Image (cartoon, coloured by chain):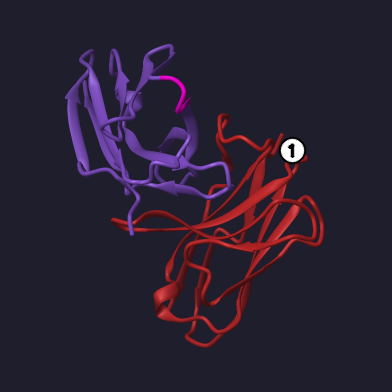
């Protein structure tokens, strides 16, 4: 069962515009949510996280929003840059060490 | 500062052969993980360890064994490789009990079983 879902396999945006990546989850026990970025032939790199007691967390150009009632989170990148082109994974975990990942969304930022 | 190092980076096995993937971290992290990544599936947890001498099963443990004899090393073994185990394997580690700071991943091992 896929408890974390990223329904958009790919997203293309113009440089300077906003990128919005979406993620849905089914397990109400999840208390931490994270986004990872992955370049080809490299491992995923931690980007930003949010705990379930918050609804927003911001780090520079990256903002994660959490809507617990809808079991939905999103990652906003503003402004988007060509170097942001990568695969983005949404992940979620409960306190018991088990982190679940979505299938990933490939973001392409066009110059 | 090497972080998480995985060896080998690439390997081709014949069905039925065995091999061990090595993960080493130099950050003194307690928690270590083995994931596999398959197209359209994201990363799925195979096994994990919460400290030296401990191991536990993840989502997809069948066909794999692990050992954590030293804190810095986490080994993933395939006793009898099958084509379904063709995948990219990632090792990861983290320092604390919460997930707020994420994992540090290695660069992966691409395994093909023919």
Q: In the rendered view, does B8 fall on the left or right side of A80? A: right
Residue B33 falls within the magenta-colored stretch:
no
Q: Residue at x 50, y 44 (%)?
A: A43
Shown in purple, the chain is A
Task: Specify the quadrant that holds the C terminus of chain A.
Answer: top left
Q: Residue at x 35, y 37 (%)?
A: A88
Q: Can I make out residue B114 in this image?
A: no
Q: Which residue is labeled 1 in the image?
A: B27
Q: In the rendered view, does B1 fall on the left or right side of A74? A: right
Q: In the rendered view, does B22 fall on the left or right side of A8? A: right
Q: Residue at x 57, y 35 (%)?
A: B99
Between B85 and B99, the one nearer to me in the picture: B99
Picture quarter containing residue B58?
bottom right
State the extent of the magenta-drawn residues as a range: A49-54
Residue A87 lies, in percent from the top left, at: 34, 39
Q: Can I make out residue A62 in this image?
A: yes
Residue A85 lies, in percent from the top left, at: 31, 31
Vertical placement of A52 versus B89: above or below? above
Q: Residue at x 19, y 34 (%)?
A: A11
Vertical placement of B67 versus A44: above or below? below
Q: Colour of chain B?
A: red
Callout 1 secondary element: loop
Task: Specify the quadrant that holds the N terminus of chain A.
Answer: bottom left
- Tell which subunit mark 1 falls on: B
């Amino acid at each position: 069962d896929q408890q974390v879902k990223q329904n958009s396999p790919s997203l293309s945006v113009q440089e300077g515009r906003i990128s919005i990546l979406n993620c849905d989850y089914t397990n109400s026990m999840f208390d931490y949510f994270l986004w990872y970025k992955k370049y080809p032939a490299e491992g995923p790199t931690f980007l930003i996280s949010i705990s379930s007691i918050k609804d927003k967390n911001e780090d520079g150009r990256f903002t994660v929003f959490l809507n617990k009632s809808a079991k939905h989170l999103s990652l906003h990148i503003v402004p988007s840059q060509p170097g942001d082109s990568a695969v983005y994974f949404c992940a979620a975990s409960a306190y018991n060490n088990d982190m679940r990942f979505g299938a990933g969304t490939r973001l392409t930022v066009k110059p | 500062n090497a972080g998480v190092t995985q060896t080998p980076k690439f390997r081709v096995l014949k069905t039925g052969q065995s091999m061990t993937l090595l993960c080493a971290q130099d950050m003194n992290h307690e928690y270590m993980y083995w994931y596999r990544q398959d197209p359209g599936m994201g990363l799925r947890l195979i096994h994990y360890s919460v400290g030296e001498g401990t191991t536990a099963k993840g989502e997809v443990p069948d066909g794999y064994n692990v050992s954590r004899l030293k804190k810095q090393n986490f080994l993933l073994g395939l006793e009898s490789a099958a084509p379904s185990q063709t995948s990219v394997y990632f090792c990861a580690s983290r320092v604390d009990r919460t997930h707020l700071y994420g994992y540090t991943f290695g660069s992966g091992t691409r395994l093909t079983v023919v």
